[in-house]
Amino acid sequence: MVFSWKAVPIVCVAVVASGPVLAQEAASVKVTDATWDTAAGMFAYTEFELSGEPLAEGLGLNLDVLDPDQANKPDPFDFAAGIDSYELSEEAMYAVNYQSGMGPHIANGPVNKARAGSGNVMEALGKRVVGLATAAGQTPDDLPQNFYPISFPLAGGKPEFAAPVDIATQATTPMEILTDTGEQKSIQAVLPAYFRDYASLRWPSDGFQNAFTPQAAGMELLKDVLWAQDYLRQMHKVDGDEPVDATSVDMDKGSDIGLGDVGADGFNGLMLTEISWDKLTMIRDQFAYDGKTLGAKIPDDYDASKTPIWLPNRVSVTLDQQNGVTALADPKVDDGGSSLRTQWVMLWPLAEFYGFSDQRPANTNQKADFLAVFDGDPFPSAPKANLEGDPLGSVAADDPFSLVQLLTRLTTQNLMVLHFDKDAGTLVDTWSDGKAGDTVTTLDAAYTLAALQIYQRAIDALPVGYASATSGKPLGTDEGKAALSLIKTQADFLIDKVKGADGLYADSYTIGTGAGASHSVATQFAVIRGFDAAFLATGDSKYRDAARDAFLAAEAHLFDSALGIYNDEPGKPFEVTPWEAGTVSGGIRVMMLDLVSRTGESNQALTLAHLAERYTAWFRTVGRGMQLAEWLNDTGEHMVATDYDGDINQNGIKSITHAGGAHGRAAVMASKAVVSAAK
């Protein structure tokens, strides 16, 4: 697949008081690996989500002015953030979670099996799904047919469809649209059967990478929990689907109020929470490892300095058929080591889930809307001992919050004991056979800072999710203080040891040897992301200054004017993966929200106008260029009955039935692509 575009000048009215922002990038993007990498892809989509509506709204945009059928209005930045970046991240989550079949079905998961007892697991799940729908004010007729919720996604797969997609017309609607190229069109939009019935959207099982990795499971967990918080942050009046803020945890107990800001979102939020609960239960029961036994029991008072238990890097699995759907079978450890990437990839979503499900009486900041989700119906509440004692739990329990407490204890212990070299003052990448490694990958150290910041907020009862920029009075727990201490230590190490004379940060550092020679785009923007987290967590302006300096160094040394974007080696073709896509998106976002120039500062590169231009060019080139296909409606794509080429909105991304493969491709991003100057 080759994607190319050439932008025209744009006016960024949402973020610029006066004057145009010019985007003149001209690049061609060729996908070189169209497989799906779950961990990397969901990482990028997490950053896309946060760089979507939350960014646009944080900059003052009224989201009601956005219309996916009016491309680039009110301007290309607003549209890229508020529509494309946000909605593509949501579509990918459902492509994997509900449609692909790329994992064990939750019907055969531990939560549903426990619920079913000796009864029929499919009947038990059916009743549960109807119950969740009812809690959201929905009926079974409102739900998509044949959706296929999975406990966890496999490491990767071939994101094509295994059989012809059902495109039978269900309805037609006349529409007026404005395309990405500025063309006004009158169309008859067709709603195909697959939009409501997912039976024909399964991926080919012979393309699955049959392995559990904590990184794939963790990044999917993060997507699920962030969206669940977004969907469930309000309640709604069932009659009229009108959002309301909960004034008590009991508001949803009658039939007139449902969970979720609207009914459809409420159901999806609850379903994603159900999937997450099952995932955490399976991780605890089947994937903890002590070097000998897979499924080792994690003590309630786990101490990594005594008998380490961890999540191994890779476990091969097979998918059997049970009860007519997939089930986990034959797990075997392929790579029994522990990695720093696993720690932050797990800590971030665990911290988000902690904040989401927190029922501690000490947390006076918790929303009643969230408390209502975990008050026993529809999800069980935690035992009193886990709400009033140790913030990381005191007794074993199977409810979501207690599971999060235990796995957070496991992760933070392993991070601070197994992966921290006290003498060198830095985290390290690996721990295996009782020994820690001596190299730290800068990207992972930087994102550990971001994960620790969310963890500190959650454990100290400050809002997380989209509200993680809000202030409040922290509880001041010992765990929160330890997190802040590690944030400072690691951030200082990066500044002192990993920064080069040119201001760029090395991709890695080896204890006893020093910083490596390479300095990639992904590393620079990960560092910006990490220093921003350190600044927000500690309030120390030196981390704000370090983040800004890293950005200015990237501007000076890594911006490729021929491509209109950053490049590891300006002047040469640039190979990108989801890691590049996500780090740059996240780095520019925090520059715009937290690190932008303020009144009295004059550096043009730090102005909102300049940052908006960089954001828009990056997303329209790399974000769109790596996207294999798009779903209908939410990003402005529509199927039409005649002369349909798969790209009615002319944004360069084909719809799922026209995007290649024998029967089409899923709405996810590729694993690799190459960006070069357009000819």
Image (cartoon, helix red, strand yellow):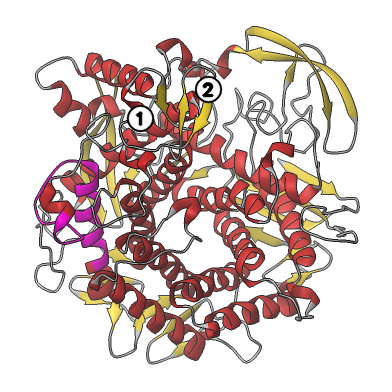
The residue lying at 40 percent from left, 12 percent from top is 140
Foreground label between 1 and 2: 1
Gap in Å between the C-alphas at discs 1 and 2?
Answer: 15 Å
Image location of residue 584, percent across then percent down: 62, 62
| Amino acid identity at mark 2 | Asp
Q: Which residue is mark 2?
A: 241
* Magenta stretch, residue numbers: 388-412
Q: Nearer the viewer, residue 548 or 63?
A: 63
Q: Quadrant of residue 392?
A: bottom left
In front: 246, or 605? 246
Question: How far from the left and from the top, in percent, is residue 417?
Answer: 22, 75
Report the side of 549 relative to 365 (left or right).
right
Front-most of 449 and 582? 449
Q: Quadrant of the N terminus?
A: top right
657 sits left or right of 342 in the view? right
Q: Quadrant of residue 137?
A: top left
Residue 151 in view, yes or no: no
Q: Return the x and y of residue 393 as percentages of the image width and height.
A: 16, 56
In the displayed structure image, the side of residue 384 where residue 124 appears, left or right:
right
Name the residue located 54 percent from the left edge and 52 percent from the top edge.
Answer: 44
Q: Could you classify mark 1 by the number of other residues whose Cα lies within 10 Å: few (under 14), some (14-19), or many (20 or more)? A: some
Q: Which residue is mark 1?
A: 251
The image position of residue 674, as x and y in percent, is 69, 55
Identify the disc placed on residue 61. none
Which amino acid does the dot numbered 1 rest on?
Met
| Residue shown at the point (43%, 17%) measured from the top left | 138
As helix, strand or loop, the secondary structure at mark 1 comes to helix
Return the disc, 1 or 2, that comes first in the chain's sequence: 2
